[in-house]
Every structure is written in structure tokens, then in C-alpha cells.
């Protein structure tokens, strides 16, 4: 049987420690690789004075990790620079926040070359290679230059932007062309796949083939939508675990008969936190007689704190939560409990379970795992209500959530009211319509579907 080599920017070995700012990608990969016997290759998160190419191999939690350290300049130009100041905002439709800088380009190219140089010696002929996310788009091209002929797949965890936005990226042609060095390019939803196809049809002489294949630049690749899921079974169990029960009891005491609305997000401008706070404030303003029945718990661990736009959104939210609390709080009630930290999975599950409403309002999101986790954590006999942005990839699957436009404060406020008033039979009906998908289309199915599709791609003839 062939080995699977997974490559992503960061490798975070699975631990039982609090999740911290660990994002959806690392949570999902740790779960997907366990018991597969594969290798997970990437950056250790450590900085070194001079890049050596030394690989640190470790076996932890049932998977083998292979990590390299990067230089300070690499981290600045590749990770903080091209990945998170250029591609992340651009791919989330925020060209107002996108920075274009040739040094970032150079750092991005250099680190992808470093990944390829160090990875090549550990690749065996039958291995299949699965590269993850926007940090590593050029990796297959670099591997091909070094003679690697193995199957290589790419999965994009974030949206693919509209063609006219992508056109603002200098040298976007080369970025797009290098995706044709993969055998399979996967997206979270058909919407992002179509956006990729539309870009190719508009900007190149691409031809669409059968079953998602696309030919351009003299090469043919397979493409497809592979919606990522969660480890639903273990999440459901986590919500009922003895540790979770302790937290649920503590929460019940602190809630004191009120209804809790919960938001859980990395502190990122794509998550629509400012709009969420304003929508909630609108609810408070519109419903003064009801406002003290509820409170919003927003859990938002800071990420990418070296980047200016992240410092700005953080300070905006500090101000906004302070202002709303100052304006509306009573001596025995605050409308927003705002917490900048991560929680272990079982505590998170307990928090979701206790919340009457899960409020998930990204302005743009590849998928959004929090929405699925909220559904999985509910009590079947008394489930809560999911309010979900129609601009999250997850909204294509969770169609029985209350779908809202996150830019509209009125829609958020109305949905909160509707969620609080929703009778039990409707809550059950909506939840039952969603839970099967969350359980069946889980992270294992995502991994299996992707790997099988990669194995099924016909041999390349370059
Ligand atoms: P993210 O942008 O990180 O992921 P999301 O899919 O919601 O967004 O995943 C976040 C993960 O981090 C969830 O598993 C959540 O439980 C965890 N998390 C968030 N806050 C936490 C906290 N305070 N404590 C503990 N855990 C916390 C990117 C893309 C998404 C895509 C995923 C997976 O942006 O669109 O769904 O990758 O592909």
C-alpha cells in the first residue's frame, strides 16, 4: 500500500493540550492522519538563524511528523508576508487589506523551494503526496523540477476569489499556472471550484473536460469539490464526557437561567466579528424588554498577531465590546462576555452544548468547522439554533440553519430573535436535517474521497 505524505505550512502534532489558536486545518489533519501510517511534513513553527534543511522526525499520537525550521526572513516574507498579507486577504475578497510586495513573492518562492529540497529525499516511488493550502501552491512545480513524478494533490482550505479580484495580484498568471503541476486540485465547495474554472476560461485558453478535468498551459488536471468535515463522533462524545459535564454544570450556574448565544472564532477579520457585535447590539436596541434574557459569549483566540490588520481588528473589537457593555450592562448582567483564549475540545463542546444559539457570521469562509461542531454538540432532545452566514462554504450543506447576510445588522438581529423564540419542534426539525450530514460527511470521508480521487487520476504524460 502506498504511503500518504501530507504537506502543510505548520505541523502541529496532536496533543491533549488546550487547542490555543490552532486552526481548523491542523485540527482536521491531525484527525485525518491518525492511524493512516502517513508522514506529515511542514514547518515546525521554530525559527533558526540559518536554514540547514535538517528534518526532525518524530512519532507522536499515531502519526509520523517531519518538520523543518525556517529563518526569520522566511517567516516574515513567506508566512506573515505573501501567505497572510497577500493571499489570505485577497482570497477572502479583501483587496483593501491586501499588500503587494516583491520581497514577499521572493520569500514565498524561496520557502517553497526549501520545502521541496528537504522533502525530495524522503519521497518513495509509491508515495502519494497531498499538499495543503495557499502557503504551498508552487510546491508541486518545485517537486516536478526535482524529478518527482508521484501523484500530487492540492487542497485549498480557503475560498478561490473571483477572477477580477485575482487579477489585482501581480504575477497571478504564474501562480495559477503552477497549479497545473498537480494531478488533482480540490476545493471546499463547487462555488470555489467554479470560480477557479471561470478564471481559467476568462484569462487562458483553458478547455473544460469530463468530470471536472481542465486542460490549460498544455497540461490536464482533475478538479473537484471536497467539503471538509469534523470528527463528528468524537465531538459528540466530547460534549457528553465527564469533563464536559463539569464545565456544563459550571456554565449552568453562571448563566443563571438566561439564554446564551455563542461565537467561537480565531480572531480574524474574515470572521465578521465586528459585524456580529453590531448585529447583536441591534438586537439589544430593538428588543430592550428582552435583552437581559440573553448574553453573547464570544471566544476569540488571537492569531497572526505580527500583522497590522490583525492588531487593528483586535483593538476594534476591544473597543466595540467595551462600548456595548458600557452602554447596556446592568449591575448584575453584561451583554457580551468576550474571551481571548482557546479551550480544549471537551470544554468547547460543553460551551456549544450550553448555548441556545450558535452565531457563525464570517464575511467569507472556505468552509467553517465551528458551524459543524456546534451542530454536533447539541442535545438531540433540546437542540439549539445555528445562525450561519450565507458566505461560509458550510452554508451550502447546512441549509437548515438560519442563513443570514452577515453585512446586515438587521438580519443578524432578526435571526437572534427568531432563534430565541423558535419552538422546540422546529429546532428539532432543523437540527435533525443537519446532523446526518455532519456525521456522514465527516473528516474521514473528506480524506478518503480526496485520496481516492487522487489515486484515480490517470498517469501524467508531461
Ligand atoms: P479556520 O479559519 O481556522 O480554518 P474554522 O473552519 O472555523 O476556521 O476552524 C477553526 C477551528 O479552530 C475549529 O475546529 C475550532 O473549534 C477551533 N477553534 C477556534 N477557536 C477556538 C478556541 N477558542 N478554542 C479552541 N478551539 C478553537 C480554515 C478555513 C476554514 C476551513 C478550515 C478547514 O478558513 O474555512 O473550514 O480551515 O478546512
Image: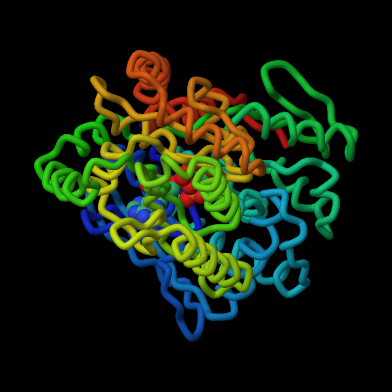
Q: How many marks?
A: 0
Q: Is residue 26 visible?
A: no
Can you give x and y, in whole percent of width and height, for residue 77 in the image? 64, 73
Can you give x and y, in whole percent of width and height, for residue 253 in the image? 16, 48
Q: Residue at x 31, y 62 (%)?
A: 331
Can you give x and y, in whole percent of width and height, for residue 235 in the image? 27, 36
Above or below residue 22? Residue 243 is above
Q: Is residue 268 left or right of residue 207?
A: left
Q: Residue at x 69, y 49 (%)?
A: 91
Front position in the image: 249 or 113: 249
Instruction: Tell me the quarter of the image containing the C terminus.
Output: top right
- Residue situated furthest front in the rendering: 289
Quarter assignment of residue 343? bottom left
Quarter assignment of residue 76? bottom right
Front position in the image: 22 or 319: 319
Instruction: Tell me the quarter of the image containing the N terminus.
Output: top left
Q: Is residue 253 visible?
A: yes
Front position in the image: 263 or 444: 263
Front position in the image: 11 or 18: 18
Q: Residue at x 59, y 26 (%)?
A: 457
Quarter assignment of residue 22? bottom left
Q: Is residue 180 left or right of residue 147?
A: right
How is the protein colored in the picture? rainbow
Can you give x and y, in whole percent of width and height, for residue 363 in the image? 62, 45
Amino acid at each position: 500500500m502506498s504511503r500518504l505524505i501530507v504537506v502543510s505550512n505548520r505541523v502541529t502534532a496532536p496533543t491533549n493540550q488546550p487547542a490555543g489558536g490552532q486552526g481548523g486545518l491542523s485540527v482536521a489533519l491531525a484527525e485525518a492522519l491518525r492511524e493512516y501510517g502517513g508522514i506529515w511534513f511542514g514547518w515546525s513553527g521554530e525559527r533558526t538563524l540559518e536554514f540547514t534543511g535538517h528534518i526532525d522526525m518524530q512519532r507522536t499520537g499515531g502519526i509520523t511528523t517531519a518538520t523543518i525550521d525556517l529563518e526569520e526572513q522566511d517567516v516574515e516574507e513567506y508566512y506573515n508576508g505573501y501567505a497572510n498579507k497577500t493571499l489570505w486577504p485577497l482570497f477572502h475578497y479583501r483587496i483593501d487589506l491586501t499588500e503587494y510586495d516583491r520581497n514577499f513573492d521572493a520569500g514565498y518562492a524561496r520557502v517553497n523551494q526549501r520545502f521541496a529540497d528537504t522533502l525530495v529525499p524522503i519521497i518513495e516511488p509509491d508515495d502519494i503526496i497531498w499538499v495543503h493550502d495557499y502557503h504551498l501552491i508552487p510546491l508541486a512545480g518545485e517537486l516536478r523540477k526535482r524529478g518527482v513524478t508521484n501523484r500530487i494533490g492540492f487542497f485549498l482550505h480557503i475560498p478561490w476569489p473571483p477572477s477580477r479580484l485575482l487579477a489585482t495580484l501581480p504575477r497571478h498568471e504564474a501562480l495559477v499556472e503552477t497549479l497545473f503541476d498537480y494531478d488533482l486540485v480540490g476545493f471546499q465547495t463547487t462555488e470555489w471550484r467554479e470560480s477557479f474554472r471561470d478564471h481559467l476560461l476568462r484569462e487562458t485558453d483553458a478547455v473544460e473536460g469530463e468530470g471536472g478535468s481542465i486542460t490549460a498551459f498544455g497540461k490536464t488536471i482533475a478538479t473537484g469539490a471536497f467539503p471538509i468535515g469534523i470528527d463528528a463522533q468524537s465531538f459528540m462524545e466530547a460534549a457528553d464526557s465527564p469533563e464536559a459535564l463539569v464545565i456544563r454544570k459550571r456554565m449552568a450556574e453562571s448563566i443563571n437561567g438566561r439564554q446564551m448565544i455563542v461565537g467561537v472564532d480565531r480572531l480574524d477579520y474574515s470572521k465578521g466579528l465586528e459585524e456580529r457585535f453590531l448585529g447583536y447590539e441591534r438586537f439589544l436596541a430593538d428588543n430592550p424588554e428582552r435583552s437581559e434574557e440573553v448574553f453573547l459569549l464570544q471566544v476569540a483566540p488571537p492569531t497572526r498577531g505580527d500583522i497590522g490588520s490583525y492588531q487593528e481588528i483586535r483593538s476594534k473589537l476591544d473597543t466595540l465590546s467595551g462600548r456595548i457593555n458600557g452602554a447596556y450592562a446592568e449591575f448584575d448582567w453584561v451583554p457580551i462576555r468576550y474571551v481571548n483564549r482557546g479551550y480544549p475540545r471537551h470544554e468547547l463542546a460543553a460551551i456549544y452544548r450550553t448555548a441556545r444559539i450558535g452565531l457563525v457570521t464570517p464575511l467569507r469562509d472556505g468552509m467553517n468547522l465551528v458551524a459543524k461542531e456546534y451542530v454536533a454538540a447539541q442535545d438531540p432532545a433540546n437542540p439549539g439554533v445555528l445562525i450561519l452566514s450565507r458566505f461560509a462554504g458550510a452554508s451550502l450543506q447546512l441549509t437548515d440553519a438560519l442563513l443570514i447576510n452577515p453585512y446586515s445588522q438587521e438580519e443578524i438581529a432578526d435571526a437572534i430573535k427568531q432563534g430565541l423564540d423558535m419552538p422546540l419542534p422546529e429546532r428539532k426539525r432543523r437540527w435533525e436535517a443537519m446532523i446526518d450530514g455532519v456525521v456522514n460527511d465527516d473528516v474521514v470521508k473528506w480524506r478518503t474521497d480526496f485520496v481516492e480521487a487522487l489515486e484515480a487520476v490517470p498517469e501524467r504524460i508531461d
